[in-house]
Image (spheres, rainbow, N blue to C red):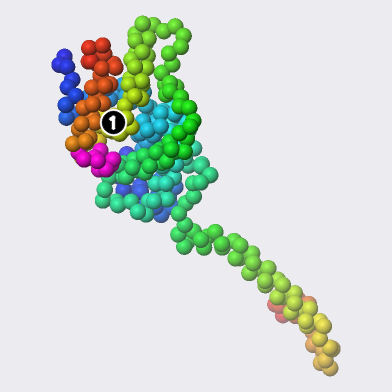
Amino acid sequence: MSEPSPFDPVPDPVLGRLLREHLDAPDATAFVARVMAGGRFALPETPLHVLARWAPRGLAAALLALVVAGWLAVKANRSQPASSEEGLLPGPEVVLAAVIDGQ
Amino acid sequence: MRISDVTDAELANRAATGDSDAFRQLVERYGPAVRRVARTVLRNPDDADDAAQDGFWAAWRSLDRYDRSRPFGPWLLRIVLNAARDLGRRRQVRATEPLTEASPTSGPLPDELADRAQMRDRLAAALSALPERQRLVVVLFEVEGYAHREIAQLLNVAEGTVRSDIFHARRALRAALGADGRIVR
């Protein structure tokens, strides 16, 4: 066996193995899980991510606005003074039933 | 496709677009080296893992600035080194614990195991006594397999400095490992 020189331009496998044994950390799987589950770990956001994040809230807000607008429209209709033709026109329930029955 | 078939640049590209599975593969691939380098700087194993984790997070946030034409490993290790040095500065007052989890020396051991344990202890002490740059250089060269030029670029020092650090570190480590300055093979 030749004595290894400090000038060797190539790595010393024995020294490398000993250093690796000393520095190797246990639980590689746990470390990966820790990195991926870290509280500060956040995906960089693209415009699509932003849209996806806001889509459910946007849809819910639009639905709510539609319901409120419909309710206000119905309320406004009912509070108008009765016209002379009102008694001649069918009510919304009658129209809806006719549409459903295909008449 | 196996993990080993996908290049670092490809994984980095996918991770940069938000693919966390690609980033996980990079963590799996580089986790061991990153933790070893962090331990080389910090010595305290808990601090080292904190720094390794901080380094991966910082790399994740900086993926859009990673030059895909260059190797991923040195880029990542440079970020981890900065994270480890930052953490070291913040925790300078904290007492360091030796890295002994993988090398228990208590209790009765057969002669061979005891010899190996003693050798590891001597290596740990000798490594710990080296200046930080020499520790890093010798670990990057002997363990991680980087060339002199790559280490010089990674640590932002001259190639001659790397060669000199390897010389001094090897001499100190070999002196610690063998009574006559040779490693017992």
At x 42% / y 41%, what residue is drawn? B86
At x 44% / y 47%, what residue is drawn? B20
At x 41% / y 28%, what residue is drawn? B43
**Chain letter, disc 1 residue:** B
Q: Can residue B34 be seen here?
A: yes
Question: In the rendered image, which residue does mark 1 sit on?
Answer: B134
Residue B60 locus on image (x, y percent):
41, 48
Magenta residues, as a range?
A: B151-159
- For the residue pair A80 and B146, the one nearer the viewer reads as B146
Residue B69 locus on image (x, y percent):
26, 51
Quarter of the figure with residue A59: bottom right
Most distant residue in the bottom direction:
A84
Secondary structure character of the magenta stretch overall: helix
Left or right: residue A101 versus residue B127 is right
Residue B158 is inside the magenta segment: yes
Most distant residue in the left direction:
A2
Quarter of the figure with residue B99: top left
At x 43% / y 52%, what residue is drawn? B18
The quarter in which the C terminus of chain B is drawn is top left
Quarter of the figure with residue B131: top left
Residue B16 is inside the magenta segment: no
The quarter in which the N terminus of chain B is drawn is top left
Residue A90 locus on image (x, y percent):
79, 84
| Number of other residues with Cα within 10 Å of mark 1, as a class: few under 14, some 14 to 19, many 20 or more | many
- For the residue pair A90 and B149, the one nearer the viewer reads as B149
Q: Can residue A21 be seen here?
A: no
- For the residue pair A39 and B20, the one nearer the viewer reads as A39
Q: From the viewer's perspective, is residue B131 above or below residue B90?
A: above
Q: What's the residue type where badge 1 is placed? A: Gln
Q: How many marks?
A: 1
Numbered disc 1: secondary structure: helix
Q: From the viewer's perspective, is residue B74 above or below residue A47?
A: above
